[in-house]
Amino acid sequence: MAVIFIACIGLLGLSSFVTQRRLKEIGVRKVLGGSVGSILFLFLKDFGKWILIALVLGCPLAILVVRTWLQNLSYRTDISAWILF
C-alpha cells in the first residue's frame, strides 16, 4: 500500500513539474480557444504512454517473482495473471 502511495506522490510531482514547464503552451492554447479536455488529453497522452510501458513491463515481472517466491513455501498455491487486474 505504501508503494502505491509513493508512486502516486511521484506521479503528482512529475505532472506538476511538466505543467509548470508547459505553462505558456497551456495559456496560448486556452487563448486560441482550446478546451480543458483537449489540454488534459495532451497530458494524459504523455503520461499514459509511460504508465502503459510500466504496466507491460511490471506485471509479467511481478507474476514471475511471486511464482518463484510461492514455490519455496510449504503450502503452495497457484497464481494467475488475473490477480493483478
Image: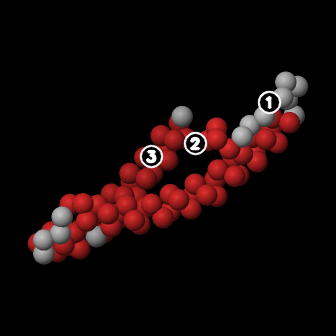
Question: Quadrant location of residue 72?
Answer: top right
Work out whether 70 lies above or below 65.
Answer: above
Q: Residue at x 86, y 36 (%)?
A: 71
Left or right: 20, with 76 as reference point: left
At label 1, the amino acid type is Thr
Provide residue 28's location: percent of width, then percent of height: 17, 74
At label 3, the amino acid type is Cys
Q: Please give the residue where the numbered disc 1 appears in the rendered image.
A: 77
Pointers 3 and 1 in contact (C-beta within 8 Å): no
At label 2, the amino acid type is Phe
Q: Please give the residue where the numbered disc 2 appears in the rendered image.
A: 85
The numbered mark, 1 or 2, whose residue comes first in the sequence reads 1
Callout 1: 10 Å neighbours few (<14), some, many (20+)? few
Callout 3: 10 Å neighbours few (<14), some, many (20+)? few
Provide residue 20's location: percent of width, then percent of height: 28, 64
Spatial CA distance of label 3 from label 1 is 31 Å
Q: Quadrant of the N terminus?
A: top right
Q: Please give the residue where the numbered disc 3 appears in the rendered image.
A: 8
Q: Residue at x 80, y 38 (%)?
A: 69
